[in-house]
Amino acid sequence: MRYALSAMSLLLVACGSTVAQTGSAPRAPGIESSGYVWNQPDPDKDAALAHRPDIEKGKIAYEVCQGCHQPDGAGRADAIYPSLAGQHASVLIKQMMDVRAGRRDNPKMHPFVGEWVVSVEDVANIAAYLSQLPISLDNGKGSGNRLARGRELYDNDCASCHGDNGEGRAAEFYPLVAHQHYAYLYKEAVMIRDGERRNANPKMVVVIRDYSNEDLKAVSDYMSRLALPAAAGR
Amino acid sequence: MKPSRMILAAACAGLLLTAATASAEVIGDIERGKALAGEICVACHGADGNSPVPMFPKLAGQHADYALKQLQEFASGRRQSDIMKPIVEGLSTRDMADVAVFFAAQQPLPGQVDDPSMLDAGRRVFNEGNPDQGVPACAGCHGANGIGNARYPRLAGQYPAYVLDQMAQFADGRRSNDKRLMQTIASRLGETETRAVAEYIASLEGSK
């Protein structure tokens, strides 16, 4: 079964790359498929994680991303381009490789992260460069109306993985969420709940399965206002 | 400054003394390049790379790395041009590097805007792209003033007619030497936005 599955994913990858030739993004099995394992080993991802990164090279390779994610990595709240500055390198590598392989759908970005644009080494170098950039503190926030509710939800259901201050956990591939744009957090939370972010963590899906949109807004707003103790000095 | 940079800078300075110049990678002889340009390229691109005709791209101030890549790709057919192909077939690799560094060292003249009413829309596309369509800001790669760098061509002051022609070639895949980056961008941009950004590019002066 394992072999059959991996043969199938190879086939899908092969088909995916022919599709990419004509401009549309590939699609690989994700959370909607039975037997989905979150953060499964993947040759390209593992090679990028193992690469000893060069930050200067990462800065140059990142030029191709700046037109959307901005030269300082702060993204754009109005365009729902996430902030990448200060994000854990492990998270950045996993997400880029998931988009490349079609485990996370992102047709807007896909043509700019294809292997014909950024090599495995570039991916590792970009991640190392971004992870050491100072986090932008003027990220987009929510309405501020239900922060007490947001805090309660966050402390009960989210802090165990995303951290008391939203710092995430690099070794576990849990994203930093502090100082992320509210609009992006909310959009992702909805997609994760509804099974549309196909590389999501099933344990997190269980936690937010019964959240209403209103509660997702409240918790996203609270998350966007979390402050890292170290952020001021970074 | 890092030691490796200092060595590079020192090496460049040394080369300049011998009347040659080095960009990030291209090393060529400006004087030889000037002679070749005056002989072969002048009719279309002008003696100093400020082309007299809008359909012939300005080469003045263009990065040598980019120009050399184009010349090699006209020769290999990776970039198609019935006009440029026979010309580059007569050039050696050394000739190409020499003309590339010569044109890179020339002063570009300001561009000509045909329709100033489009400049505001063009500036927006250049600096912000179009998030709904997934178009990144042109400035992200080509630089805030369209000056470019060793990896991305200079656009500032280029003729709108040439820019529009290249955008059309990228959009329908006739030009495909761009890692599909410009093909994606050109096919996502609407017609009016493309015309507006071409006008804005013409208005960019930017220093060399």
Image: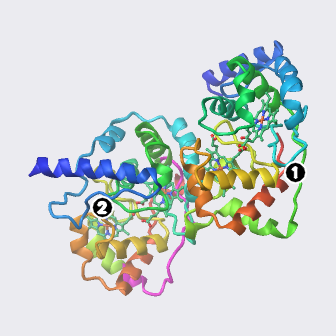
The stretch of residues the image draws in magenta is A132-150
Chain of the residue displaying label 1: B
- Viewed as shown, does residue A218 lie left or right of B202? left
Q: Residue B168's image quarter?
A: bottom right
Is residue A128 placed above or below B88 in the rendered structure? below
Front residue of B85/A82: it is B85
Task: Rate crowding at label 2 as few (under 14), some (14 to 19) or many (20 or more) other CA atoms within 10 Å.
Answer: many
Please provide percent x and percent y for residue B96: 72, 24
The relative height of residue B66 versus residue B117 in the rendered view (above or below) is above
What residue appears at the point 24 percent right and 78 percent down from the top-left corner?
A209
Q: Is residue A135 magenta?
A: yes
Q: Is residue A123 above or below residue A85?
A: above
Disc number for residue A202 = none
Q: Per the image, is A169 magenta? A: no
The kind of residue on which mark 1 rests is: Gly
The quadrant where residue B28 appears: top right
Q: Which residue is mark 2?
A: A199
- In the displayed orientation, state which residue is furthest to the left: A1
The answer to whether residue B27 is left or right of residue A169 is right
Binning the other alpha carbons within 10 Å of mark 1 as few (below 14), some (14 to 19) or many (20 upward) gives many
| Residue nearer the viewer, B26 or A219 | B26
Q: Position of residue B191 (x, y in %)?
A: 69, 66
Indicate the amino acid at tag 2: Asn
Q: Residue B141 appears at what percent x and percent y?
A: 64, 49
Q: Residue at x 81, y 68 (%)?
A: B118
Residue at x 73% of width, y 53% of height: B165
Q: Is residue B136 visible?
A: no
Secondary structure beneath label 1: loop
- For mark 1, what is the residue? B111
Residue under the image location 44 percent in, 39 percent down: A119
Asked if marks 2 and 1 touch (Cβ < 8 Å), the reply is no
